Amino acid sequence: MVSFRGTSLRVHEGYLDAPPEVLRAIVLFVEGRTRAERRAAQRTIVAHPVKSVAASTRRERTRPEDERLAAELTRCHAQYNARHFHDRLKSIPIRVSRRMRSRLGHYTVGAAGESAEIAISWRHLRRHGWEEALHTLLHEMVHQWQDEAGHAIDHGRTFRAKAREVGIAPSARRALTRDERGAPRSGRIGRHAARDE
């Protein structure tokens, strides 16, 4: 919901109408001098009910031709839940998105009467293959775990520790890609870097 790295601060749109004490907590979360200050600020931030602007719009649906992929991703979600999360995560919809262009996957918090969901980019599946898509699914499941456990949804220390525990890269970016034809490319990548928002 709130994350920062270096000079970049990212705040979920649901905090646009937050009361002053929550906005002060966001500043303290970034600029707090002690761990206790930052943790107290984090508790205030997480306690604020987030109403997503996107939640009020109609969610994209998986296309009929992609339903088989979504069903297989759902099956893998259940397997990963048993293997890495002791079956503690809720069963949520897994969607294949044809709209995603720069993101490979996304976890959406439940809001406005809709359940939480995970979306995996169809382009990601096509360009990078099934194994990379499963890595992204597990990455998004760590965000689901953060949400359900009451942690801030970010790529901070808690995320990185859980990511290592489940065996995935502990960052929002991966330096593995394939070109448009699916052939492996070497070296650090730019525009095709795996991203999670």
Image (cartoon, grey):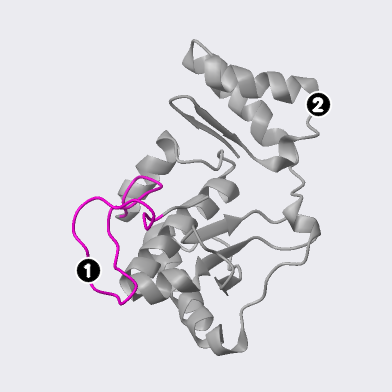
Query: Which residue in the protein does label 1 denote?
Result: 184
Q: Amino acid at mark 2?
A: Pro
Residue 109 in the figure: left or right of residue 125 = right
Q: Earlier in the sequence, mark 2 or mark 1?
A: 2
CA–CA distance in space, label 2 to label 1: 49 Å
Name the amino acid type tagged 1: Pro
Mark in front: 2 vs 1: 1
- Give the magenta range: 168-194
Label 2: how many Cα within 10 Å (few below 14, some 14–19, many 20+):
few
Is residue 176 rendered magenta in the image? Answer: yes
| Residue where numbered disc 2 is placed | 19
Measured as percent of width and height from the top left, residue 142 is found at 46, 52
Residue 179: x percent and y percent?
A: 30, 69
Which residue occupies the foreground of this view, 192 or 157? 192
Tell me the quadrant of the picture where the N terminus can be found.
top right
Direction left: furthest residue: 186
Main SS category, magenta section: loop
Name the residue furthest top. Answer: 33
Up-down relation of residue 179 to residue 9 (above or below): below
The x, y position of residue 86, in whole percent, is 43, 60
Residue occupying the point 48% across, 82% down: 69
Label for residue 89?
A: none
**Residue 105 visible in the picture:** yes
Instruction: Point out residue 73 in the picture as x, y percentages from the top left corner.
Output: 47, 75
Residue 186 drawn above or below residue 172 = below
Q: Which residue lies at the image location 36% right of the left edge and 41% below the top edge?
A: 161
Residue closest to the eye, 185 or 92: 185
On the rendered structure, is 78 left or right of 162?
A: right
Q: In terms of secondary structure, where does tag 1 sit?
A: loop
Tell me the element at label 2.
Answer: loop
* Residue 88 visible, this orientation: no
